[in-house]
Amino acid sequence: MGEETALHSLRREYAAMPPVAAMQVRVEGMEGGRLRLSAPLAANVNDKGTAFGGSLVSLMTLAGWGLVAMRLERAGVAAEVYVADSQVRYLAPLRSDLHASAALDEGQSWDEFLRTLAQRGRARVQLRAEVALPEGGVAATLSGRFVALAKEAPAPG
């Protein structure tokens, strides 16, 4: 399956989730193995006029989840994706629209992830995500472990 088809499917998935729709998340595309998402500050602002911390972590988590879901779809693998755990660092206030990206962490392999999922019915992968500052630098980072559980084929009959 092609990347554009997988991006379209991801847009549909996000649109079906009420909290994601409320954040007004947009799938910007893939670039260099990184899934890029954005959301307007106006829908994700806190009482200080900066990006709400919950929105920052949500957008980074969605970028990681979406990256895994797209990779599975492109491989033709039916599986459910979950975030197992994550660590977030808030580094600087963000006073503009949110732009997040996620990619495989160092030492991780999509081939190994897919092989493990095929063999065991479950697999995990470590990803890194960040929200960029408009002037350069990073507002927040997320290191997360995402798990895929193979969907069982429906019983005949």
Image (cartoon, grey):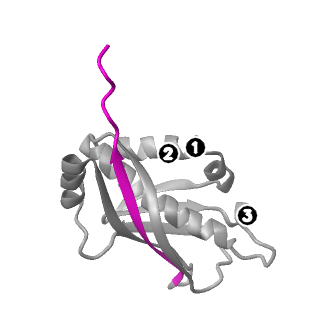
Does residue 123 lie above or below 95 as drawn? above
Badge number at residue 42: 3
**Which of the image's four quarters has the N terminus?**
top left
- The three-letter amino acid code for the residue at tag 2 is Arg
- The three-letter amino acid code for the residue at tag 1 is Ala
Does residue 89 lie above or below 8 as drawn? below
The residue positioned 21% from the left and 55% from the top of the image is: 116
Does residue 132 lie above or below 119 as drawn? below
> Is 9 a magenta residue?
no
- Can residue 122 be seen here? yes
| SS at circle 3 | helix
- The three-letter amino acid code for the residue at tag 3 is Ala
Q: Quadrant of residue 9?
A: top left
Q: Circle 2 is placed at which residue position?
A: 11
- Number of the front mark, 1 or 3: 1
Distance from Cα at disc 2 to Cα at disc 3: 20 Å
Whole-percent x and y of residue 7? 41, 47
Q: Cβ–Cβ below 8 Å for labels 2 and 3?
A: no
Whole-percent x and y of residue 14? 54, 47
Left or right, 80 with reference to 75: right
Segment tinted magenta in the rendering:
138-157
Whole-percent x and y of residue 101? 45, 67
| SS at circle 1 | helix
Looking at marks 2 and 3 on the same chain, the residue that comes earlier in the sequence is marked by 2
Q: Cβ–Cβ below 8 Å for labels 1 and 2?
A: yes
> Is 145 a magenta residue?
yes
**Local crowd size for mark 2, using a 10 Å CA cut-off: few (<14), some (14–19), many (≥20):** some
**Which of the image's four quarters has the C terminus?**
top left
Q: Circle 1 is placed at which residue position?
A: 15
